[in-house]
Amino acid sequence: MRKIILILVAIAVVLVGGGVGGFKYWLSNQGENKDFAVSGNRMIRVKEGMSTNDIAQLLHEKKLVKNPKAFGYMARFDGLANKLQAGMYQLKGGMTNKEIVDTLAKGKVQFVKFVVPEGYSVKKIAQKLKTEELGDANKFLAAAKNYAPYAYMQKDNPSINFKAEGFIFPATYDFAYGTSEEKMLQTMVSTFNKRMEQEGILKEVAERKLDLHDVVTMAAMVELEAVFTEEQPRIAGVFDKRVKIGMPIQSDTTIQYLLGKQKEVVLYKDLEIDSPYNTYKNPGLPPGPIGSPGVSAIKAVLKPEKNDYLYFVAEKDGHHRFTKTFAEHQQAINDIEAGK
């Protein structure tokens, strides 16, 4: 009797082993997609909440997977069915089911570079995301409206357009395709805080009992006024002196911000716009930054050049002529117009 049982067990093992082996052979055979897939790379987006079957069907529709059921079985057989990650992937036509499953399980998503230039406002960044087809402009604007994770961003002034304005660090970012607008904003703002710490700016501001929000507000205007970095401390010195004597800063950059577009020539009627951001009508700093300053502009505000200048005007090459009196300022304007 015992011999019969051992024989039956042996037969069962052989049958199960043969079945498993046969199934693995079938999976391997059905997992080859070269005779089905179209050559070249294909972008696919795996959305949050998609099941393995949903992903398999998407891959089949994209001409990447020949047999959707075989793809699902492969994922389950490898224990990865519940580990396929959402994101944007670049897959090459002809990859096997196993290769695709491994790619999705490891989250090897496609990354794209996004550049935030110095001086860019929240609105310009949102438009750039839209133009480069990386995000929805309105969603980014909505996220930036009240996003203020750090104490220095948390101002109660209702005139502030976007609490994140000025605190999006200008840099080159690597974002995974499909990254949400909220997550991109979080990364940009956390990068600002990290760089301020690395550059010793947070420490200096604290030691000098300064308000970083005010520093960045001034730096944004300096960034946008100065074409050449070497002029930033001098321009910061002019603005600093004006604030201290109660004279309006009168920066065209704040008018451009209000207009929402770059005008070659700011008209006198533009200077009459009724807004707290209008530095021609209101003395002192505007409610908040008008763009994202770089580190050099922030450092220029922390260490402005000590001078007697109260005025400056742009020359044709982007440099500025600095003067002490209004009469000298008017003469500088006339000289530049005359080509002197």
Image (cartoon, rainbow, N blue to C red):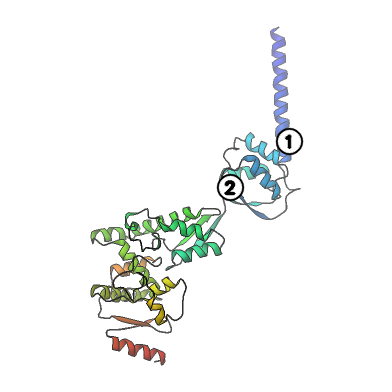
> Which residue, as the protein is rendered here, is positioned at the far right?
35
Residue drawn at point x = 29 percent, y = 89 percent: 327
Residue type at mark 2? Lys
Q: Is residue 269 above or below residue 194?
A: below
Residue 284: horizontal and vertical position, in percent?
29, 71
Q: Nearer the viewer, residue 80 or 146?
A: 146
Residue type at mark 1? Trp
Answer few, some or many: residues within 10 Å of disc 1's Cα (few below 14, many 20 plus, some between 14 and 19): few
Lower position in the chain sequence, tag 1 or tag 2: 1
Circle 2 residue: 47
Residue 78: horizontal and vertical position, in percent?
62, 35
Residue drawn at point x = 34 percent, y = 88 percent: 332
Secondary structure of residue under mark 1? helix
Res 185 seen here? yes
The part of the image, by quadrant, that contains residue 244 is: bottom left
Residue 121: horizontal and vertical position, in percent?
43, 66
Residue drawn at point x = 67 percent, y = 36 percent: 73
Question: Is 305 on the left or on the right of 58, as rendered?
Answer: left
> Which residue, as the protein is rendered here, is positioned at the far top?
1
- Tell me whether the residue at label 1 lies in contact with that at label 2, contact meaning CB atoms closer than 8 angstroms: no
Secondary structure of residue under mark 2? loop
Question: What label does residue 26 carry, if any?
Answer: 1
Q: Distance between the residues labelled 1 and 2?
A: 29 Å
Question: Is 201 on the left or on the right of 112, as rendered?
Answer: left
Residue 51: horizontal and vertical position, in percent?
61, 40
The part of the image, by quadrant, that contains residue 217 is: bottom left
